[in-house]
Image: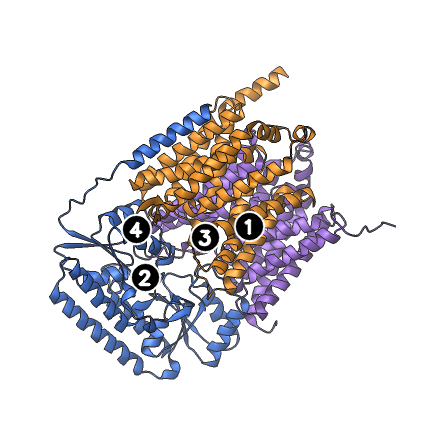
Chain colours: A orange, B blue, C purple
Amino acid sequence: MSDILTILIASLIGISCSILGCFLVLRRMALLTDAISHAVLPGIVIAFLLSQSRDTFFMVLGAGTFGFFTSFLVEWLQQKGKIQADASIGIVFTFFFAVGIILVTQYTQEIDLDQECVLYGDLLHVTLDVWLLTDGTNLGPKTLWLLVPLLLIIITFVVIFYRTLQIITFDIVFAQSIGIPVALFHYALTALVSFTTVTSFESVGAILVVAFFIIPPATAQLLAKRLQHMIILSIIFSIVASLLGYYLSVIFNSSSSGMIVVVAGLLFLLVFLLAPRGGYFNKKKLSHAATLSS
Amino acid sequence: MIIRYIIINLFIILLLISCQSNNETNDSSKYTVVVTTNIIENTILNIVDTNYVNVFPLMKEGVDPHLYKATRKDLELLNQADIIFYNGLHLEGKLAEVLDKLSRQKKVVALADVLDKEKLIQVGEGIYDPHIWFDVVLWKEVTQYARNTLNENNIPTSKKNYISYLDQLDSTNNWINKRITNFPSKKRILITSHDAFSYLGRAYGIEVNALLGISTVAEYGIKDINNLVDYIIENKVRSIFAETSVSSKSLEAIVAACQTRGHEVQLVSGLYSDALGKKDTKEGTYIGMLESNINKIVNSLN
Amino acid sequence: MLNSYTTLIVLIGVILLSINCTIIGTYNYLQKKSLLADVVAHSILPGICLSFLLTQEKDFLWLFIGAFITGMASIYTIDFIKRASFLGEDTILGIVLSFFFGLGIVLLTYIQNQGFSEQSGLDNFLLGRAASILISDVKIIASVTLILVVTIILLGRLFVAIAFDSAFLSQIGISTKLIQLIISTLTIMTITVGIQAVGIVLIAAIMIIPPAIGRLWSYQVSRIILIGLLASILSSLIGVYISYTFPRSPTGPWIVVGLVGCFLFSLLFGTQSSLKVFEIRKI
């Protein structure tokens, strides 16, 4: 039972992350997730100080707000400040993280926050952390109640605005010229990314959530020719990684989220080396052919 | 269409499998007691009847309870447990919340709950120092509580072992008191990097000072280091102590700073704080760990 | 303030570190690889765990070697994937960062569950604190500074050339691979030495922010470095001063805040900034 639940949670996170991740990867915004996952620390601390509770809801709210704020600042520095993309991400997340540490240190008497629960996360804990009603009814893991609605929102968003998102992703200039509110869609996407990041990192940890966003979509991108296929493939890869990774982690008695990431990485490597179109070995042949034809 | 088809199907399959009931059974004839730290493990081992009871700790040797991560084996253990003991007062971090939830289905006992809040050391609003085992009198109370709970739940305990263990606790307590009172109160200053010894300090009249509070995310600044150095020099402290589970780097910086101001201070390592030493050694038992700590402290401060 | 030994050591340590990170950070910035610092910093974890598994002890030298090897592996993996696929640079960085860190976490939990009593505090290697820099750290950092400065004086021009015109380099018969190897080695050395002294985030910050500040004032590489150095040294002073004056004020994070302060100032007043409030006319 708990095995299935753990795999279910990992897969749900994987699905949410890889759907959004496809857009991030294609729009060259992949590292935004890394920035968000570090920058939420002050959000968590402030939420904790204000609410005086460790309740997941407040944490997600505080962290989500800061995550969104981060992506806003990164975008602003890039657009208005003309700062190189990589540098603007680096500046924002190190700053927020530093502020977070300063806050924790100042209020160290009032806060008993562990590095663990902020930065590492744990799939098994989350599985055990069930939502009990006062009469003792077991409603299953709390995270599930956050993850399922989130996934539904993401799917609805992507299905309804699929064409629009596609245009923005592949030809932003054209999108602007036909009057699509590009900025609005950008912030809607980053808001979804922020909330997915914070909902997931309690389960898989702040740093590993980056892998869930990036690795399956990147693997899919090596194989797919169309956006639709890329999304489906990345979902499949993330589910396979969750299943295999979880069982390997049981065999080696080690962190399940870490092992899922390792499996996802190995899948990427496999596809990278062997893919028929973009694969390493075939690419050599291809580029050889390309130089011949040119 | 294909996306939705696949997603919906996966959902249904996963949900169907997840609804299957769990029919794992514990076929071992012995009772299973699961505990969190190996300090609790050692205590429980001394009171149960080991012919009928197995005791399993979740945290292995050398694992800082703050940094512990659950594995699936641990989940199996928790599922099979007839009774679960943990320290409480947030020593186990997030795990405590999980155990608390589990208490609706199983007998889960937070040992620190038996203690009067007035006997605890408060570090913040509603936050108490969890390192209660450093006061042997408190730990004896905890031991009695554990035994009563085991009896109430019909888990075989050994009366003979229990009584002799309580005796041992008493004599250890007396021994510590003797060791400490035998050396001048001015010298009784225990400086460590992590704030784990407040109970030891209070129970046996040692002044305790640490660089870090209980949170592991917090950092210290230069001012904090300088203040501690001033304090060491003012009180002519001869030794400072590093715990086995915490990096001693901050303390090395303090030793270096003291040296340049003409005060020799020695860095003593290997004080046990959150976990016991290796199994089958003296430090692998609760009493042995206490003795080792006290000997280290007294010998190096004198 | 300077008569306190700790303060003096910390100050010297962070200033030397600022010099290292700013210089090597600038060359990475020019290649649009600022976040490489972050990637390498996280890739160190599996190396530390592996060398612990092999040697079963927490010896600094072995941990350092392990860290160096996986750090190098991460850089080469990035280059390898980049050369052979159409994936974006940021995607590749993300993949490598999270894969190596995931591997690190797996190894760390594996070690934890094996019950080595020596293992605790293994991840402390990544969690250095600026306030407890030791004289031994300062010596190591200083030797890196020495190596770095000498290399830059000898090869600085080539480092710039590789960012802007690597084709030219190969034309005149200089191996770009060799130059890249030297830059990578210097980067990893700076990071590995820095991390166990001051921690991941501070290292990432002083590698990324000073070059960005310099770029807001000038487009000449030597000036970017000089202005970056000025900003990072100033921020080190600010950070150390605040940490020296107020209790419970961590040094590293305050240095980052100082850096961001300098950055905002440059954003408003920098001659090359697109947001500058004053136009300084050239006469």
Mark 2 is surrounded, within 10 Å at the Cα level, by few (under 14), some (14 to 19) or many (20 or more) other residues, namely: many
Residues indicated by labels 2 and 1 sit on the same polypeptide chain? no
At label 2, the amino acid type is Gly
Q: What's the distance in space between the residues labelled 4 and 1, CA to CA?
A: 36 Å
Identify the secondary structure beneath mark 3.
helix
Q: Position of residue B282 (x, y in %)?
A: 24, 65
Q: Identify the residue under disc 2.
A: B88
Q: Circles 1 and 3: CB distance less than 8 Å?
A: no
Q: Identify the residue under disc 1.
A: A66
Mark 4 is surrounded, within 10 Å at the Cα level, by few (under 14), some (14 to 19) or many (20 or more) other residues, namely: few
The quarter of the rendered structure image containing the N terminus of chain A is top left
The quarter of the rendered structure image containing the C terminus of chain A is top right
Residue drawn at (61%, 56%) of the image:
C18
Q: Identify the residue under disc 3.
A: A118
Question: For the residues carrying marks 4 and 1, which lies nearer the camera in this image?
Answer: 4
Q: Position of residue B25 (x, y in %)?
A: 19, 43
